[in-house]
Image (spheres, grey):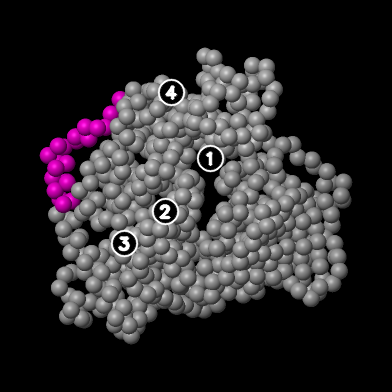
Amino acid sequence: MPEENQILNGEDNIPEQPVEQIENGYSEDSIKVLEGLEAVRKRPAMYIGDTSDRGLHHLIHEVVDNSIDEALAGYCKNIKVTLHTDGSCSVEDDGRGIPTGLHTVKQISTLEVVMCTLHAGGKFDNVSYKVSGGLHGVGVSCVNALSSDLKVTVYREGLIHTQSYSRGIPITQVEVQGKTDRTGTVIRFKPDDTIFKTVNFRFDRVTERLRELAFLNPEVTITSIDERESLEEVYHYQGGLVDFVQYIDELVTSVVKPVYLSGEEKNENKTPTQCEICFQYNNGYSENVLSYVNNINTIEGGTHVSGFRSALTRTLNAYAAANSKFNKVQLSGEDFREGLTAIISIKLAEPQFEGQTKTKLGNGDIEGIVRSIVNDKLGQFLDSNPAEAKKILEKATLAAEARIAARKSRELVRRKNALESSMLPGKLADCALRTPEDCELYIVEGDSAGGSAKQGRDRKFQAILPLKGKILNVQKARLTKILENEEIRTIFTAIGAGFDEAFDVEKARYGKIILMADADIDGSHIRTLLLTLFFGYMQDLIFRGKLYIAQPPLYKLKKGKREYYAYNDQERDETIQRIRKEFGKTRTVEADEEIPDVESVDGIIISRFKGLGEMNPEQLWQTTMNPETRTLLKVTIEDAANAARIFQTLMGDKVEPRREFIEKNAQYVKNLDV
Ligand code: 0RA
């Protein structure tokens, strides 16, 4: 079993490529082109991140991004994504269509150049906002290289053109099929199952991103169809970012109407920089700022986010200063962030991305542009909406009072820490090694599971921190309250890297923090509470890929003296079959055969683990903690918009939707892309 369910570099197991294109009489140029795509097949992970579920869905996003580029350039209004019954996916748009004329350099159809040349997919006119072909997009040619079959249909200049490929190699010429009066592109591709570990597209995964794109680009209508399940969804949000903010905060109570601000910075000969912001306040305490540059989620923020933050503080403070009702307490930036949900969307011609995951906007001039747009437009808004302004400032004033109280308790915590100097929490069973990169911290639900974990671990590099039941819901509490919570303080101290703005991931005492809770509803609630804590106060741990979720098995199967473990229902059934084969029985299990908590089939005793506490230390080590045999899920925040909404749902104050949500998504952590 692999240690982590992530990138397996495709260096081994590369299927040999047929190089039969020479027989088709292509020029030397085109052979060079094909060599380019060979690189993609050799190292797919370098181009699309990985070859798991994630990389697979990346293919769709890649093609859709090209259609979105057409929309950004003002030529495309409709995009349709279809998951077909044969396992292929098609993306159709009504943009200009990929150019089909003769490519002057390569002397073949430009369509073939775009489809078969690495990094040739971008626009040739450099006056547009680019998503694809840039740092994030790798071009449709990569999708072509990684598809066992791909067919492109272009409607352009009155004609229908098609070309087909297999693994990036043309198997037909560009052919004219007939006349048309529309324009656009249809790309239908079937992912190569010799490259991808799974080729099963998941509709929910596809629609998540499409919905986000529809919010960010109100001019487009995106239709998503799953022919396998007869599902269809249409996304079109006239309200754009306003709809987006309301969608995220759907399940929490807002205290002001969404504020929408937009502006444009024109500079000579260049594509103007567009800035759109929408924010509102809810009655919670956490801050949710989602930011996008050319539709790419800038998880790490950047100059657009800092421009927004500083202008929000400055403008609201200036308004407070001018209104005697509100200048009693000195309001600071964080007071204006409590309960804030904001979306910042910037479109600019040449974004520079920096940071750990290249999702931080670096363009220096953007900070000033955003700041001046927010100063101007928010100033106007406050002047013309005094009632809304009052609500915002009242909320910030409450936050300031709480902050002052929080500072006092924080000082208390610090002083206490200073007194105890390097004292680690008593409940922590620390490991022997002191090199963080080798060390792991298991945060374990419940004292009894904690006890088993302590006995079962390898004390050289594994530390155990047992938690007593549920931790505080940080989404619903202010910092004062959070710091009063003993369980949370224990977690902060054990990790030893501070919290909130002062969190310094370099100081973390462990290279892996592993959350271990039962595989039931309670366990997943605790996991969510912990994830919320890390998401809100130690986010860099997630960015740096140091947060994991342990995967305890669900079943134990026993035959004679032999024991087997299964991590899900499918594995359980496969294991039953395997044992039967080993023991010479052939009866097959029906797919929907009911297997109760403890049952004996053909002398195989099947029991369901109800909780971690049921496993003895040796079992726990063998199934869940031994790096040789365990599976860990790495927590990532790829889909920040969805994560934000899920946290709001689970932690917000509307009880009924939360209950429904938990019932429907007992395994919802999957939606967090862990
Ligand atoms: C290259 C140049 C132009 C458009 C495209 C590619 C293009 C690519 C895709 C992929 C999916 N849909 C697409 N639509 C367009 C510019 C075309 C022009 O200048 O007329």
On whether residue 661 falls in the magenta region, the answer is no
> Which secondary structure lies at badge 3?
loop
Find the distance from the CA under tag 4 to the CA under tag 2.
33 Å
Q: Which residues are magenta?
A: 409-438
Q: Which residue is most to the top?
A: 561
Q: Name the residue type under label 2.
A: Arg
Q: Position of residue 9 (x, y in %)?
A: 59, 38
Q: Quadrant of residue 290?
A: bottom left
Q: Secondary structure at mark 2?
A: helix
| Residue 432 screen position, x and y as percent | 30, 25
Residue that appears at 77% across and 71% down: 156
Q: Earlier in the sequence, mark 2 or mark 1?
A: 1
The residue beneath circle 3 is 284
Quadrant of the image occupied by residue 387: bottom left
Q: In the rendered structure, which amino acid carries the disc numbered 1? A: Gln
Please say if 171 is above or below 268.
above
Gap between marks 1 and 4 measured at Cα: 25 Å
Q: Nearer the viewer, mark 1 or mark 4?
A: 4
The amino acid type found where label 3 is placed reads Gly
Mark 3–mark 1 distance (CA, rounded to whole Å): 34 Å
Q: Quadrant of the N terminus?
A: top right
Tag on residue 6?
A: 1
